[in-house]
Structures are given as C-alpha cells and as structure tokens.
Image: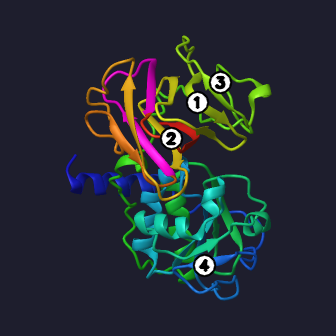
Amino acid sequence: MPDERRGLFRTIAHRLAGDREELPIEGRLPSFDRATGWLNSEPLTPAGLRGRIVLVDFWTYTCVNWLRTLPYLRAWGTKYHDAGLTIVGVHTPEFGFERDLRNITAQARNLDVDYPIAIDSDYGVWDEFANHYWPAVYIADADGRIRFHHFGEGEYARTEMVIQQLLVDAGGGARDFDEDLVMVDPEGLEVAADWRTLRSPETYLGYGQSSGFLSEDSALYDRAQAYPGGRRLPLNSWDLSGQWMQARHAAVLHEPGGRISFNFHARDVNLVMGPVPSGSAVPFRVSLDGGSVDGANGTDVDAEGRGEVGDQNTYQLIRQSGQVTDRVIEIEFLSAGVEAYCFTFG
C-alpha cells in the first residue's frame, strides 16, 4: 500500500474510532521518590511534571513483551515531546543481573531509550503504582491524574489516541501535531509475535519457576549433575544434556559441550542467558530437528547456526518463515560458564 494511502487509512480509522473517549480518573500520579537512581534526566516529580502529559512505562530490558512495544514508545516520544508529552521509563528488574546499573545503562544505550529512566532496582516505584506487570503503561493528564492504563502488548492505536486527546485537553483544544497515528518498522526482537501460530509459553529454566523440564528432580536442585539427554520431548517440554546445575534462578553449565533441547511451536525462539563470570564469552551452536537452521537463524545466530553469549541479555535464536510446525531446537555450548534463564517465543 503506498504511503499516502496508508496515511489516509490511518486518518479515517482514527476518525471512525471517535475523537474522544470517556477516560476515568484512576487516581493521582504516584511519586518516583523511591527510585534508586535516574538515567537521561535529573530526578522527576509529579509536581515538576504538572502541565505535561506523562506516560509511565514499566520495563525490564530482557522482557521480549516490552521489547515489542519499544518501537511505539520511541515513535511517540519523538512525535509528541514538543507538544507536551513526557515518557518516563521505570526499569524494574526481573533477573538479578538487571539490577546492575552498568547493564541497564549499556542496554538503554543499545536500545536507543533516550527518555528519562527511573532505576527501580528495589521495586519502590513498582509498589507505589501497585504494579504487577511488564510491560505496563500508565498515562497521566496535565493535572497529574491517571486517566488510562494498559498491561502487556497491543492497544497501540488506542494508547496513542489517548495521548492525543489529553494533549488537546491540556492545550485548550489546540492540536499541535499531525493526527495520523505513527507507523513503525520494527526489526529483530522488536517485531510483533505471530500470535496466530504461537503455541509455546514463556518457560523458565531455574527451579524457582520452571515448567516442562523432563529431567527435573528436586533432589538434584543446586547440585552439579550429568544429565544424559536424548529423550523424546513432548511439545513444550525441554531437557538438558551434559554437566549442569539447576539453580533457583537458572540452569548453569559446568563443563563444555552441554546442551539444551526444547520442543516448541512458534515462529521465533529467544533465550535469556549470560556468561559466568560476566564479561567472558561462550560460543554456541544451534540446530533444528537434529540438522542445520537452514535459513531460520535469528538475529543473534549466523547462517551456520553459530553465536556467542557475550553479555546477559535476550538472544534471538530462531526466526522462521513459512509454515510453523512442532520442531526441536538444540543449543550446544562449546565452553562452560553459561546461565540460561528463560525461553520466550514469538
């Protein structure tokens, strides 16, 4: 569809949706005082933000659900900042390494997150908002009243129309922006999931939240153990082979040659993992159904299925095109010293 027709379609859809939505008052914008630090800004306060529309976004940098919302956050920040929108990202960690300020700073830079970030490593701001989700968006009007919230992915058009409505209200009815909704062109981990074919859930490898582990045995928790592997995997189950320890937070590899296998049904396979110690590098090799990735390599894997764990992050291992079926991914680590935390799918 040509760009001009896209713009016309978006404008018509916007008008058909109605210019105004009745937005409830959900309370006052809570304080950010319990943040443990700030990036890209001096500390912000509700009083200091009065007069601006404030979008508060709870995130953590390995969360693939948040990563898929990021193109919209960037686009809204660019388009509406001068019209009166302030985005405040609240980084609340899921995994222990996401508490490390050096990691947060590096990933904010890598991901081009240039709006103010409240570092919430002690969950203080999370508690002030009584939040329970990544991602979560709260939007406050110019008087500091929460008027809208959304948990998870999606609802991008509605969220943007709320931003526009509150900006117009704050400006006395003036529209200092193009009313067409933003369009984004995401890449890599930021591409939306293929929800039509997605049948595999987020799956943790540490015993604190694990599910689907074929060889799980509570007697072996926190102990290095030689796992034989090689068993047939039902859909959405996984197994280890080699010398591993299933710790509360992750599966930890103790010797080279360890493998993780997972029977999945999805277009994309991602794995949160990192080297031990931090700063080292662990090469790995990915196969599908016992063979090559055959063009289905993700952005962190080359055409031969090879990659390297260089930092604690989310790695995209597989992105398929064409028909999606049940398949078995195997990741072989060629060196010891890796922690594997969580599979996600798209």
Examine the residues drawn in magenta and state their main secondary structure.
strand
Residue bearing the label numbered 4: 38
Q: Spatial distance from mark 2 to mark 3, Cα to Cα?
A: 24 Å
**Label whose residue precedes the other's in the sequence (3 or 1):** 3
Sequence order check: which comes first, mark 2 or mark 4? 4
Vertical placement of 214 versus 312: above or below? Answer: above
Q: CA distance from mark 1 to mark 4?
A: 41 Å
User: What stretch of residues is rendered in magenta?
Assistant: 313-332
Looking at the image, is mark 2 or mark 1 earlier in the sequence?
A: 1
Residue under circle 3? 212
Q: For the residue labelled by badge 3, is the local secondary structure a helix, a strand or a loop?
A: loop
| Number of the label disc, if any, that sits on residue 243 | 1
Give the percent coordinates (x, y) of residue 265: 48, 23
Dot 2 corresponds to which residue?
336
The quadrant where residue 194 appears: top left
* Number of numbered discs: 4
In 3D space, how far apart are the residues under numbered discs 2 and 4 (Cα atoms)?
A: 35 Å
Front residue of 202/83: it is 202
**Cα distance in 3D space between marks 2 and 1:** 9 Å
Residue at image coords 44%, 77%: 175
Q: Are marks 2 and 4 in contact (CB under 8 Å)?
A: no
Residue 89 shows up from this direction: no
Left or right of 44: which side holds 293?
left
Q: Sequence order check: which comes first, mark 1 or mark 4?
A: 4
Q: What is the three-letter code of the residue carrying label 1?
A: Gln
> Residue at the spot x=44%, y=31% of the render?
332
Which SS class for mark 4? strand
Mark 1 or mark 4, which is nearer to you?
Answer: 1
Camera-near label (3 vs 1) is: 1
